[in-house]
């Protein structure tokens, strides 16, 4: 299928794709807040400016769009038009994501990724976060007791 827009029209359209406060991100934040988690948003002091920062647990959450970050799901399929360009773009995003995760983990942060396709069913996410955050809390409590 050929693109019905000119290159300038397509560029203008793509420039309006939101990077912050996307629907999946807002949904994740609402669920976290409803379950008692308190957080900060888009902390620019941290590598990658994570979407959600849970300072109490030293945990960050990135809400990734499946297409843009190369998730292996239906939503993550690359467009067939200009496929090489899309593949290059997504591969760069994946490499950048890996570098950001390494930087955060080296600074002692726990990193959680929520994919756009997962954002609808967040009960599993909340359960996963609770387990991870409880493990982090108990590790900290043990570390504090051993001081």
Image (cartoon, rainbow, N blue to C red):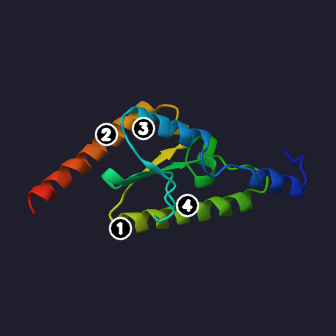
Alpha-carbon distance for marks 3 and 2? 10 Å
Kindly report the distance in space between the C-alpha atoms of the residues bearing marks 1 and 2.
Answer: 22 Å
Where residue 60 appears, as percent x and y from the top left, is 42, 53
**Tag 1 near tag 2, CB within 8 Å:** no
Is residue 56 left or right of 26 when viewed as pictured? left
Q: Nearer the viewer, residue 104 or 67?
A: 104
Q: Secondary structure at mark 2?
A: helix
Looking at the rendered image, the disc whose residue lies closer to the viewer, 3 or 2, is: 3
Q: Which mark is residue 130?
A: 2
Lower sequence index among marks 4 and 2: 4
Q: Secondary structure at mark 4?
A: helix
**Position above or below: 137 against 98:** above
Name which of mark 1 and mark 3 comes first in the sequence.
3
How far apart marks 4 and 2 lie (CA) works out to: 27 Å
* The label number, if any, that marks residue 144 in the structure image: none
Residue 111 higher or lower than 100, as above or below:
above
């Amino acid at each position: 299928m050929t693109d019905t827009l000119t290159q300038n029209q397509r560029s203008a359209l793509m420039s309006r794709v939101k990077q912050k406060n996307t629907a999946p991100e807002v949904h994740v934040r609402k669920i976290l807040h409803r379950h008692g988690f308190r957080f900060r948003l888009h902390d620019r002091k941290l590598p990658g400016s994570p979407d959600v920062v849970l300072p109490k647990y030293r945990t960050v959450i990135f809400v990734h769009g499946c297409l843009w970050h190369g998730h292996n799901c239906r939503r993550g399929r690359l467009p067939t038009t200009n496929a090489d360009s899309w593949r290059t773009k997504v591969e760069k995003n994946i490499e950048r994501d890996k570098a950001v995760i390494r930087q955060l983990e080296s600074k002692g942060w726990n990193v959680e990724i929520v994919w756009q396709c997962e954002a609808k069913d967040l009960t599993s996410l909340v359960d996963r976060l609770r387990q991870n955050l409880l493990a982090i809390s108990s590790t900290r409590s043990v570390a504090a007791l051993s001081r």
